[in-house]
Image: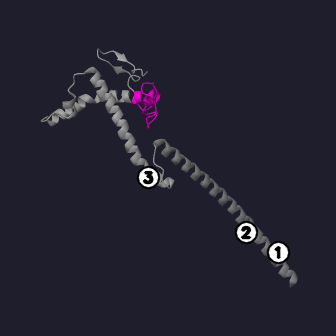
Amino acid sequence: MVVGFVAEFDKQIAELQVDLQSSETKRQHLAAEVETRAREVHELMGDIRAVCDRLGVALVPTQARRLLLVPGRARELAMVQSGRVAQQMVGVILAHYPNLDKEVVGEGWPPGLADEAYERFEAEAAPLAERMVANAVGELGLLDDPAGGASPGDGAGDASLLAHGLLIGAAEETRAGGRAEGPPVQE
């Protein structure tokens, strides 16, 4: 009876050792997975921090809360950059037409303009507006540096503009008289 008991006990010990080894293997796999996930979270938090820092998003207690501020900051940056592009476009127009009545144009569409005229003028303006935006974006370096750090007129952004299909004529502008020139040189 003792021999049978010892044999049964040895059998149970062997089974428990197999179970223990299986549990240890599972624990090691789970530990490796937890480590991988922790590393991914750490990298993601670093990426979030870098993006938020680059965009100038305010510091708040957690990265998750900071991430929630990105859309508002992106809108702010978009408005600033839109203003820079519009200002440059209007500057180009004023350089060609210095006697333009800025007050009247600043009021918007002429009163009483028919709906068909709006559509016609907008359609007529589209190709020129596209060129002027592409030129301004290239000269201001906005695609290379959405936060606005590139120097105007340094040629930065041309490859990026081409990649995005926005660069027309390698950032050339058509000047009065039909002559194409590169962006003005900033000194």
User: In the rendered image, which residue does mark 3 sit on?
Assistant: 68
Residue linked to disc 2: 19
Q: Amino acid at mark 2?
A: Asp
For this rendering, which residue is in front, 18 or 180? 180
Image quarter of the N terminus: bottom right
Question: Would you say the residues marked 2 and 1 are in contact, meaning their CB atoms lie under 8 Å apart?
Answer: no
Nearest to N terminus: mark 1 or mark 3 = 1
Query: What's the mark number on residue 187?
Result: none
Extreme-bottom residue of the structure: 1
**Magenta region includes residue 150:** yes
Q: Main secondary structure of the magenta part?
A: loop
Residue at 52% across / 47% down in the picture? 49
Residue 74 position (above or below residue 158): below
User: What type is the residue that disc 3 sits on?
Assistant: Leu
Q: As displayed, is residue 103 above or below residue 2?
A: above
Q: What amino acid type should be assigned to the residue bearing mark 1? A: Asp
- Mark 2 is surrounded, within 10 Å at the Cα level, by few (under 14), some (14 to 19) or many (20 or more) other residues, namely few
Q: Which stretch is magenta?
A: 137-165
* Residue 164 relative to residue 125: left or right: right
